[in-house]
Amino acid sequence: MNLQRNIVPKFHQINALHFPDFQTNKIKEGINFYSINAGTEPVIRLDLVFNAGLNQQLKRAESSFTASMLSEGTTTKTALELADALDYYGAYFQTRGSSDDATASLYCLEKHLKKCLPLFIEAIVDSIFPEKELDIIKRNSIQKLIVNEKKNSYLLRKNFYQNLLGINHPYAFFSEKVDIENISVSDLKLFYQNNYLEGLKYLLLSGKFSNETLYFIQESISASILQNRLTNSLIPAITSSFGNHFIEKKDAVQCAIRIGKLSILRSHPDFRKLQLLNLIFGGYFGSRLMKNIREEKGLTYGIYAALETYKNASVWYIDTEMNNKNRQSGVDEIYKEMKLLGTQLIGKEELEIAKNFLLGSFLRSLDGPFSLADRFKILIDNNLSKEYYTEFVKIINQISSEELLEIANIYLKQDKLVEVIVGKS
């Protein structure tokens, strides 16, 4: 085949999207089993999602430490024996905690599931939390914290969320040294009992699999001691401290800047429009913030705007680092670009480029069964309809500059902002 490198590839506009169908079964009271059968290789991922996020912990750090120690051994197997047994079949599992939940995931070939799933379940339902391993994790965590506390970026995130949400809000939890030192095995075991053994929210299977596999998983989890005793999340009221906050760091050559505010949840009808507006403002390399503050002014190597969504809150912010002497010029330019979004219509070409970029990025995020499962988890966790992603494509294609101007004046107004700067005065 002769390559015609002087011919530009054809451009195809994304007009529609078909999100794969998923299956839902009931395992036990309050526990759903979701599955997405997709992919070409017989590899599967089984996610067990637990009601064990930061919003459930009674003591700081116990959520993350419990998730970290689930794989540290059972009454019959050490952590090494568990890892070796799974590794023999080319399988492994990992746990990860977040603000709203915690997930334990098993990756394996479908043909080895009958050998691997019992090991996976054993690791979860019979975790013993050895004191020796906890001490090692605590020492490592304290050392990591000491390093982080010297970084502008860490101090910025911490102060921004604590000023925007309040120091007692779980989404603003940042463990201190004393929190880590005070964590005990008994704390973890209590959290484990309440939020893992009695806190399985749902299962999510993705990959290429047969009905026999579905049935085997369903029977195995049904026979386990895992339950879902519904509990309320510990979400206190948001107490924001709006305005400017400066954190002195005398040895800082660069300053870190974050400006933001509370925003809308994914379930809000305007959320997808706000996603596009945020992209134009600072969400990709061709954004206005990048063109102005990086390319034209040369004030920073990088600047971006982001929407972070949780189950019970959403945050919009601009983040950058720049030389201390340039920070006021940079902040002024950020506010200038914010004002322009609410006073001038976005040009047709700029809008089309942003739409195509957003839709193209979205399609790339659906590449593979595990990526599809991650997208589907968003639907489950936010109580969104299965048409959410199909509607997303339609909304982005149809939105006008006039609508985005209105969105900017509603959600990106320069009020109730938290501005945090970490640097040298």
Image (tube, helix red, strand yellow):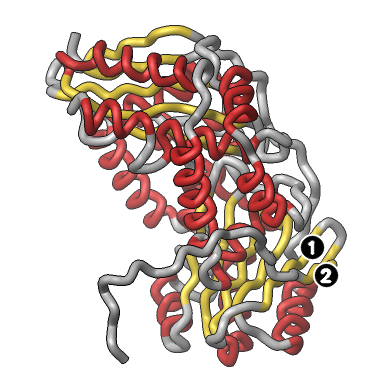
Q: Residue at the spot x=78%, y=79% of the render? A: 219
Quadrant, the N terminus:
bottom left
Q: Residue at the spot x=74%, y=69% of the render? A: 22
Quadrant, the C terminus:
top left
Rendering coords of residue 73 (x, y %): 48, 67
What amino acid does circle 1 point to? Answer: Asn
Left or right: 243 in relation to 265: left
Residue 236 visible somewhere in the drawing: yes
- The local crowd at label 2, few if under 14, some if 14 to 19, many if 20 or more residues have their Cα within 10 Å, is few
Rendering coords of residue 367 (x, y %): 51, 68
| Residue receiving disc 2 | 25
Quadrant hosting residue 248 = top left
Gap in Å between the C-alphas at discs 1 and 2? 6 Å
Between residues 383 and 399, which one lies in front from this camera angle?
A: 399
Quadrant hosting residue 42 = bottom right
What amino acid does circle 2 point to? Answer: Asn
* 71 vs 149: above or below: below
Q: Residue at the spot x=39%, y=8% of the render? A: 244
Identity of the residue furthest to the front in this view: 7
Q: Are marks 1 and 2 in contact (CB under 8 Å)?
A: yes
Left or right: 319 in relation to 66: left
* 209 vs 180: above or below: below
| Residue receiving disc 1 | 32
Left or right: 192 in relation to 283: right
Q: Secondary structure at mark 2?
A: strand
Between residues 186 and 79, which one lies in front from this camera angle?
A: 79
- The local crowd at label 1, few if under 14, some if 14 to 19, many if 20 or more residues have their Cα within 10 Å, is some
Q: Residue at the spot x=63%, y=40% of the render? A: 272
Residue 199 visible somewhere in the drawing: no
Q: Secondary structure at mark 1?
A: strand
* 207 vs 27: above or below: below
